[in-house]
Amino acid sequence: MLLALSVAPSGVPSEGSRPNDASVHDAVAAAVKIVRESGLPNQTDSMFTTIEGEWDEVFDVVKRATEAVGHYGSRVSLVIKADIRPGYSGELTAKVDRLENALVQEP
């Protein structure tokens, strides 16, 4: 499974966060840290973090990352998109490799 997530806090920040800072980079960093420490293959870009693994392990990471972001606001917005394809692994990079190969092939 590949799962892309985007998670962000909103509402009144909890203690220790910066109430006048509109940026969510600290909250996102807390989530990405959990993803990276999970040991699952992952990739972060400007909009999403994508994780590859089995259903239960991926959703455990999503839950923990979402809970971490919850410390930065009174509510959390979570966007998820998943590609569930049993029997395949290494798709985090393989899908992009296939795309790049298609782009360089002549019609």
Image (cartoon, rainbow, N blue to C red):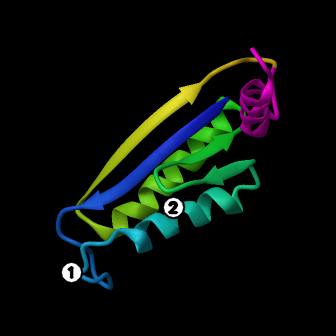
**Residue at left 62%, top 56%?**
35
- Among numbered discs 2 and 1, the one appearing first in the sequence: 1
The amino acid marked with disc number 1 is Pro
The residue carrying mark 1 is: 19
Residue 85 is labelled as: none
Most foreground residue, 14 or 98: 98
User: Split into 4 quadrants, where in the image is the C terminus?
Assistant: top right
Residue 25 image-quadrant placement: bottom left
Magenta range: 88-107
The residue carrying mark 2 is: 31
**Residue at left 71%, top 32%?**
54
**Residue at left 55%, top 28%?**
82
On whether residue 69 falls in the magenta region, the answer is no
In this view, 81 is above or below 19: above
Task: Give percent across and percent down for residue 72.
Answer: 32, 70
Main secondary structure type of the part rendered in magenta: helix
Most foreground residue, 22 or 34: 22
